[in-house]
Image: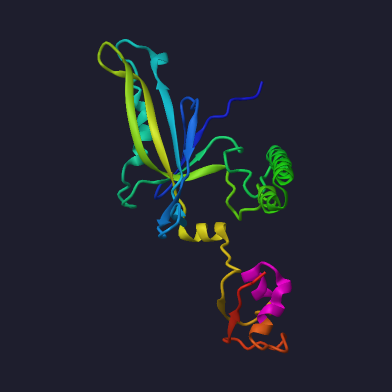
Amino acid sequence: MSQLRKAVIRVDWYDRKEDIEVQYNPTEYSLDKQAQFGEIGVPGLDSPLQQFVRGQTEKLTMELFFDTTEHGMGAGATSVTSETDKIYQLIKIEPKRHAPPLLTFIWADQFPGSSVGGAPGAAASAATRAIGGAAAAAASAVGAAIGAAGAAAASGLSAIGASQGGQRRNGLRCVMESVRQKFTLFSPEGVPLRATLTITLREYKTLSEQLNELQLSSPDRTHVHVLRQGDTLAAVSTAYYDQPGLWREVAGANGIDDARRLASGRFLRVPRLSR
């Protein structure tokens, strides 16, 4: 029989780190991730056009159960707040940070999102292969059903599970958004002995972390690149097109005959790809 693994909330206090184990593992949790779209109204169309604006913060919601009746329910009973206050403190402001502490919720290495872009670990790799196989089968079925138009759809479906930069994860880096405490059992002296805490954790990512994860690229847009010492056209092509072999597109757009002679500080036009 495998040993029970406790869920942990890792706290990054201003001057130290602390792992807080939940008393009992949650029986369920929910993750909510949304994207925000704006509507562009065009006269004469059946419905407005959808314009992506930005992603919304992901939220993790769960209920945590606490019980101290094993220490007795009569005189001198241990209050359940000795356990619940460990969680409640995570929404309070740290004096030196002027904000609540940063957290990471960790349980198993198969936390949802661990397989995005290829997961570490044999079990996760197997899961990724299974998902990829199912996606390929679905793509084949779609392609057979809708003919030539289905080729593009099949291609899109087969890309399920493709690399998404560094977005895979084994836990949720977050801050505490809300805590609701419900006390359900009391000693004769009025000491709370059981409680259920409903907590919502809000995803936390810095700007640099998000840019590194997204690895945004726009080959369908024209860019301007300032050459730095040691830059090559192949490196520029890789940065904007993700294909070093397209360096000739950059050379042609800038009238460069000798790609080995590039002056630092020169502005290069990186043309959009039409194909």
- Residue visible at 43% across and 35% down? 61
**Would you place residue 213 above or below residue 22 in this image?**
below
Between residue 85 and residue 201, name the one nearer to us. 201
The answer to which image quadrant residue 80 occupies is top left
Residue 226 in picture, x, y percent from top left: 56, 81
- Residue visible at 39% across and 15% down? 69
- Residue visible at 57% across and 29% down? 5
Can the viewer see residue 53 in this picture? no
Residue 91 in picture, x, y percent from top left: 34, 41
Residue 220 in picture, x, y percent from top left: 59, 69
Q: Is residue 101 magenta?
A: no
**Would you place residue 73 above or below residue 225 in this image?**
above
- Residue visible at 72% across and 86% down? 260
The answer to which image quadrant residue 191 occupies is top left
- The structure's colour scheme is rainbow
**Would you place residue 201 above or below residue 182 in this image?**
below
Can the viewer see residue 135 in this picture? yes
The answer to which image quadrant residue 190 occupies is top left
Residue furthest front in the image:
44
Magenta: main secondary structure equals helix
Residue furthest left in the image:
189
Residue 230 in picture, x, y percent from top left: 66, 80
User: What quarter of the picture does the C terminus occupy?
Assistant: bottom right
Q: Which residues are magenta?
A: 234-250
**Is 151 on the left or on the right of 211, as rendered?**
right
Q: How many marks?
A: 0
Between residue 234 and residue 40, name the one nearer to us. 40
Q: Is residue 241 magenta?
A: yes
